[in-house]
Image (cartoon, rainbow, N blue to C red):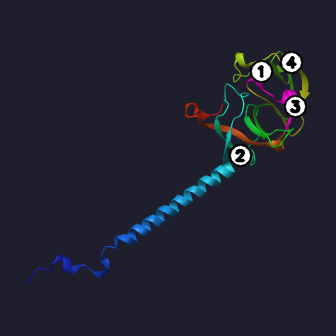
Amino acid sequence: MSEPNGDQDLPVDAAPPPRASSALITTIVWFRDLMLSVLIAMLIILFLYRPVKVEGTSMMPNLYDQERLFINQFSYKFGGGIKRGDTVVFWFPQDTTKSYIKRVIGLPGDVVSMKNGTVILNGKALTEKYVPPEYQDHFSMAPRVVPPRDYFVLGDDRSASYDSRMWGFVPRSYIYGKAVFVFWPLAHLGSVN
């Protein structure tokens, strides 16, 4: 009895699939995965993070003119409260077609005043490590009580900022995001202080 030839024992259905069919399936799977990735990225950008561009110098030295950053739109909508020191993006109360970016200084119920550039919060001088001396000014302001559901905001470059000192408080409903991450230019890549 002779040994069977290995080629003769292969079942007919075990033949390799044609190459054209395999390439088509691979392309369809790749395209499906690409579309799923794009959809997930769009959902993240639309509902969680949104890119914005800084316009102006009022937040220097922490944010520079023309920097691009991501803001978190989700944290304030669902349970995350606005905290003192947060850098927020909001609709400008005097013209809601414009957005501003500033730092939250006064929370609802706080008493805010300024004396020669020093912020006095609830009767005590506020320590602001994010405002270097060269960005201070000598502005003074009588005490103001922050109304419920409003916030008092200032730019980090006090000598160049148009903020709550001039135009008043920001309603909570106007604040739509928290600045979290600078992504452009690459030299400034990193989280927002």
The magenta span reads: 157-170
Question: Residue 166 at x, y = what percent?
Answer: 87, 27
- Please name the amino acid that badge 1 sits on: Ser
Q: Which residue is mark 3?
A: 167
Secondary structure of the residue carrying numbered label 1:
helix
How many C-alpha atoms fall within 10 Å of the one at disc 3: few (<14), some, or many (≥20)? few
Q: Which mark is residue 145?
A: none
How many C-alpha atoms fall within 10 Å of the one at disc 2: few (<14), some, or many (≥20)? many
Task: Identify the residue at image location x=78%, y=26%.
Answer: 161
Q: Earlier in the sequence, mark 2 or mark 4?
A: 2
Secondary structure of the residue carrying numbered label 2:
loop
The answer for how far apart the CA atoms under marks 1 and 4 are is: 12 Å
Q: Which residue is mark 4?
A: 140
The answer for how far apart the CA atoms under marks 1 and 2 are is: 29 Å
The answer for how far apart the CA atoms under marks 3 and 1 are is: 16 Å
Question: In the displayed structure, would residue 167 be above or below residue 96?
Answer: above
Task: Identify the residue at image location x=71%, y=46%.
Answer: 73
